[in-house]
Image (cartoon, helix red, strand yellow):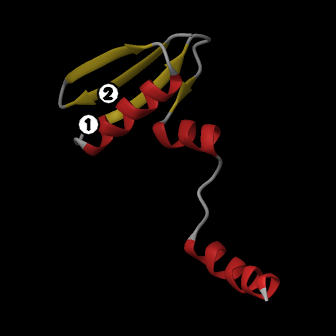
Amino acid sequence: MSFTVSARVSARQFSFQHRSMLGALDQSLSLLVSGMSDVRIVDADGRAHTPSALQALLFGARSTLKDAVSVAPVLTAQAA
């Protein structure tokens, strides 16, 4: 499958081709960290994703600290 990562800095637009979704996600996150804007990942079917949306699609939504704190007492009670 083919993925295109595009990003913008000032008036310049860059695009990079990747064969794997993880490679495209990795580069898109690196581009965001380096200060580029309008970072998008487009798959072979033409669907565009932001890096955070693709990460959530692949790995699920990140749990918040509140979720981790509310689960901790349950896990401790079950272990006893």
Q: How many marks?
A: 2
Residue 7: mark in rendering: 2
Nearest to the observer: residue 75 or residue 65: 75
Q: Residue at x 51, y 10 (%)?
A: 2
Q: Residue at x 52, y 24 (%)?
A: 21
Report crowding for label 1: few under 14, some 14 to 19, many 20 or more residues within 10 A (C-alpha): some
- Residue 37's x, y, as percent? 30, 37
Closer to the chain start, of discs 2 and 1, is 2
Label 2 to label 1: alpha-carbon separation: 6 Å
Please identify the residue farthest to the front as the structure is shown.
80
In the depicted structure, whether residue 71 falls above or below residue 26: below
- Residue 9's x, y, as percent? 21, 31
Q: Residue at x 74, y 79 (%)?
A: 75
- Residue 36's x, y, as percent? 26, 36
Q: Amino acid at mark 1?
A: Met
Q: Residue at x 61, y 63 (%)?
A: 63
For residue 30, side relative to residue 5 (left or right): left
Q: Are marks 2 and 1 in contact (CB under 8 Å)?
A: yes
In the depicted structure, whether residue 43 falls above or below residue 41: above
Q: Amino acid at mark 2?
A: Ala
For residue 48, side relative to residue 74 (left or right): left
Dot 2 falls on a residue whose secondary structure is: strand
Image quadrant assignment for residue 66: bottom right
Report crowding for label 2: few under 14, some 14 to 19, many 20 or more residues within 10 A (C-alpha): some
Dot 1 falls on a residue whose secondary structure is: loop
Nearest to the observer: residue 4 or residue 24: 24
Residue 61: mark in rendering: none
Q: Which residue is mark 1?
A: 36
Work out which quarter of the rendered image holds the C terminus and state it.
bottom right
For residue 42, side relative to residue 34 (left or right): right
In the depicted structure, whether residue 62 falls above or below residue 60: below
- Residue 23's x, y, as percent? 43, 25
